[in-house]
Image (cartoon, rainbow, N blue to C red):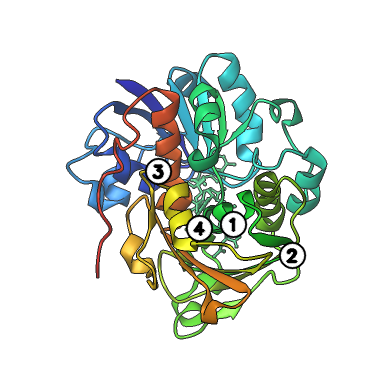
Amino acid sequence: MIKVGIVGGTGYTGVELLRLLARHPEVRIEAITSRSEADLPVSELYPNLRGHYDDLAFSDPDPERLAACDAVFFATPHGVAHGLAGELLGRGTRVIDLSADFRLRDAQEWASWYGQPHGAPELLEEAVYGLPEVNRSRIREARLIAVPGCYPTAVQLGLLPLLEAGLIDPDHVIADCKSGVTGAGRGAKVPSLLAEASESMKAYGASGHRHLPEIRQGLGDAAGRPVGLTFVPHLTPMIRGIHATLYGRLTGEPGDLQARFEQRFRDEPFVDVMPAGSHPETRSVKGANICRLAVHRPGDGDTVVVLSVIDNLVKGASGQAIHNLNLMFGLDENAGLEAPALMP
Ligand SMILES: NC(=O)C1=CN([C@@H]2O[C@H](COP(=O)(O)OP(=O)(O)OC[C@H]3O[C@@H](n4cnc5c(N)ncnc54)[C@H](OP(=O)(O)O)[C@@H]3O)[C@@H](O)[C@H]2O)C=CC1
Ligand SMILES: CC(=O)N[C@@H](CCC(=O)OP(=O)(O)O)C(=O)O
């Protein structure tokens, strides 16, 4: 069995790791941390886990206990993994970070978007961006994984087939994205209150969101040159889910777009290219580690529209993190990730 630790076990991505790992045949949880809930049994905070982890309680983050694990997930706010990752790696423990700490290759760029100095620039060279559909072979060899953000996962998967093949103008790409409120984490914040978030919808970060440089970095790699991206996130009254509507201007006659998308993701277990004409719904991915895509060319014109949906907590975070673990340890890629979505 692979011994696993989770730092930040009380948050939404932490409990989602627990839910998915409860069905993982090769993993045993050795440590799960919370500073605010130390000593509380996990099933008291999360009754959905009763019967699964009856002997497991939250504990303070203790580097000794974490270093005894084969792998540690960080499900913490940005900046936390910077402080502990180096020590764990030095002691032979692999690190899978769900936060943004190691996603940007440039420490200065990270500092400017996250408003603090990068805490571990010496680790950036070995960090692997954990998008399996792009980096599968590097992930297999990695010791340190930066799990992609939720918006970046939905946007990159939808645009990769177009940018890799040079089918759209890389200077004018638009990502219009909607997120459920769990995207903001479990901490109490006014915009997440029921009375603020329900029966209403709003854009935010229109003039610059911290996922913009992350998405640009990935799309630039796919296009082989810098990409001009307009990215506007929105908060919507749903609990889970990301819906990305992506627009690109075709550079010429693209051929059969549907066939291109199917071919690009033919061997990917967690990307579903839906039949031509589909409109994927966020509820069709709720609780499941899957991205569903549909590609449209309205009126056979020069604009291509891609619809991409994921569950922000699963393919957008904890499920993708477990997919990375499976690859790093040579396990079945599907282990712990086989459950279909909850619908309705
Ligand atoms: N929510 C989402 O949809 C997604 C989130 N992410 C990223 O994953 C990470 C976790 O997100 P989420 O689960 O939503 O966050 P939450 O705010 O829900 O939970 C954060 C967790 O981290 C712990 N924590 C906070 N500060 C520290 C610290 N200094 N040292 C150790 N533990 C700490 C908290 O417990 P305690 O304070 O008790 O120690 C809590 O368990 C974030 O970086 C987020 O950006 C990525 C993709 C999607
Ligand atoms: C709705 C909402 O607030 N979403 C968050 C993004 C989700 C998230 O946790 O960001 P990472 O993927 O980078 O960790 C935000 O806009 O900051």
Amino acid type of the residue tagged 3 in the rendering: Glu
Image mark for residue 268: 3
Residue that appears at 74% across and 65% down: 208
In this rendered view, identify the residue nearer to me: 19 or 245.
245
The residue under label 4 is 185
Q: Upstream in the sequence, badge 3 or badge 2?
A: 2
Q: Report if the CB atoms under discs 2 and 1 are less than 8 Å apart.
A: no
Mark 1–mark 4 Cα distance, whole angstroms, equals: 32 Å
Q: Is mark 1 within 8 Å of ligand 2?
A: no
Mark 2–mark 1 Cα distance, whole angstroms, equals: 24 Å
Q: Is mark 4 within 8 Å of ligand 1?
A: yes
Mark 2–mark 4 Cα distance, whole angstroms, equals: 20 Å
Q: Is residue 172 above or below residue 11?
A: below
User: Does residue 244 appear in the picture of this structure?
Assistant: no
Instruction: Give the quadrant of the C terminus.
Output: bottom left
Q: Upstream in the sequence, badge 2 or badge 1?
A: 1
Amino acid type of the residue tagged 1 in the rendering: Leu
Q: Upstream in the sequence, badge 2 or badge 4?
A: 4
Q: Is residue 234 above or below residue 97?
A: below
Residue 198: x, y in percent? 45, 81
Single out the mark in the foreground, 3 or 1.
1
Single out the mark in the foreground, 3 or 2.
3
Does residue 250 appear left or right of residue 208 in this picture?
Answer: left
Report crowding for label 3: few under 14, some 14 to 19, many 20 or more residues within 10 A (C-alpha).
Answer: few
The residue under label 1 is 162
Instruction: Give the quadrant of the N terminus.
Output: top left
Residue that appears at 61% across and 73% down: 303
The quarter of the rendering in which ligand 2 is drawn is bottom right
Q: Upstream in the sequence, badge 4 or badge 3?
A: 4
Q: Upstream in the sequence, badge 3 or badge 1?
A: 1
